[in-house]
């Protein structure tokens, strides 16, 4: 089965974004992973709507937007306007998660929920049927280039079981520390989509790196 590779623009060259966007357009990558950080939910600030709007002008693939912000409800319509195709919010940032998910879908976007490393997958039991995507954080959100947390494997297995038992169509995406050393094992236990930032952009041949990740992930 072919799997989804989503390079994270957080590790791209912000002074030359168009070049990195075109590299992804011309690669075997499937999605653009876009990390929005507000300096409140996570201890870092990345970029917001004007930058995403500029990315959208050049990007020829799905925009997979990962919100690491408090109060995401306030901005759902704005993210649709600037071109998000998939909008993922954090479970830990949403008091009324069901309402937030419905609002994302009502705007015509795919809806995802992300879990921090300490949050058990069981919190999604009553909403899994409504989700298009679950994003498992395999590092603490906020920064690129961190090491993969090993307990992620167990979480993915539990989530896969929950998805099957509930007849959900949710995709499983893993974000943080993904490399050619762990992608195959993650794929074999049911991960559908892989975010990779540092591993792709720190390589001198990112197109080749993306191709080799895709090959390793495809079972
Ligand atoms: C971290 C972000 C990730 C990050 C992944 O908070 O959500 O998307 O860019 O970067 P790497 O692949 O470098 O761990
Ligand atoms: Zn992310």
Image (cartoon, helix red, strand yellow):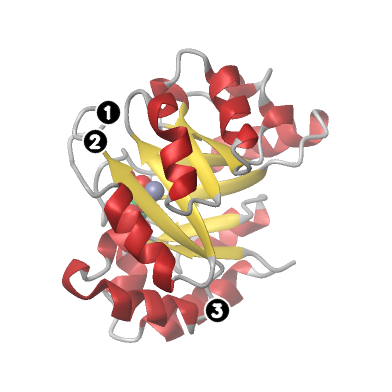
Residue 39 visible? The answer is yes
Residue 63 screen position, x and y as percent = 49, 57
Residue 152 visible? The answer is no
Residue 18 screen position, x and y as percent = 31, 76
Q: Residue at point 41% right, 73% down?
A: 58
Residue 178 screen position, x and y as percent = 42, 58
Image quadrant of residue 44? top left
Along the line of sight, the residue nearer the viewer: 50 or 179: 50
Are the residues tagged 1 and 2 within 8 Å (C-beta)? Answer: yes
Alpha carbons under labels 1 and 2: distance apart: 6 Å
Image quadrant of residue 38? top left
Q: Residues within 10 Å of mark 2 (few under 14, many from 20)?
A: some
Q: Residues within 10 Å of mark 3 (few under 14, many from 20)?
A: many
Image quadrant of residue 180? bottom left
For mark 2, what is the residue? 38
Are the residues tagged 1 and 3 within 8 Å (C-beta)? Answer: no
Residue 28 is tagged as: 3
Q: Residue at point 56% right, 38% down?
A: 112
Q: In which quarter of the image is the N terminus?
A: bottom right
Q: Which of marks 2 and 3 is nearer the N terminus?
A: 3
- The answer as to whether callout 2 falls within 8 Å of ligand 1 is no
Alpha carbons under labels 1 and 3: distance apart: 32 Å
Q: What element carries label 3?
A: loop
Q: What element carries label 2?
A: loop
Query: Would residue 67 be found to the left or right of residue 146 on screen?
Result: right
Q: Quadrant of the C terminus?
A: bottom right
For mark 1, what is the residue? 41
Q: Residues within 10 Å of mark 1 (few under 14, many from 20)?
A: some
Q: Residue at point 35% right, 56% down?
A: 52
């Amino acid at each position: 089965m072919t799997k989804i590779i989503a390079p994270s623009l957080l590790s791209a060259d912000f002074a030359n974004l168009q070049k990195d966007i075109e590299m992804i357009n011309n690669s075997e990558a499937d999605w653009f992973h876009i990390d929005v950080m507000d300096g409140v939910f996570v201890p870092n600030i990345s970029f917001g709507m004007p930058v995403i709007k500029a990315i959208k002008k050049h990007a020829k693939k799905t925009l997979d937007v990962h919100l690491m912000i408090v109060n995401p409800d306030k901005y759902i319509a704005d993210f649709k306007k600037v071109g998000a195709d998939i909008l993922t919010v954090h479970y830990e940032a949403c008091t009324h998660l069901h309402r937030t998910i419905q609002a994302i879908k009502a705007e015509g976007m795919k809806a995802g929920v992300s879990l921090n490393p300490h949050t058990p997958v069981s919190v999604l039991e009553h909403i899994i049927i409504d989700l298009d995507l679950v994003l498992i954080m395999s590092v603490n959100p906020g920064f690129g280039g961190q090491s993969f947390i090993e307990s992620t494997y167990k979480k993915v297995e539990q989530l896969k079981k929950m998805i099957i038992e509930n007849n959900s169509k949710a995709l499983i995406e893993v974000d943080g520390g993904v490399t050619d050393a762990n992608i195959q094992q993650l794929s074999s236990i049911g991960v559908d989509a892989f975010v990779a930032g540092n591993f792709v952009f720190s390589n001198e041949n990112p197109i080749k790196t993306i191709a080799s990740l895709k090959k390793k992930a495809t079972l």
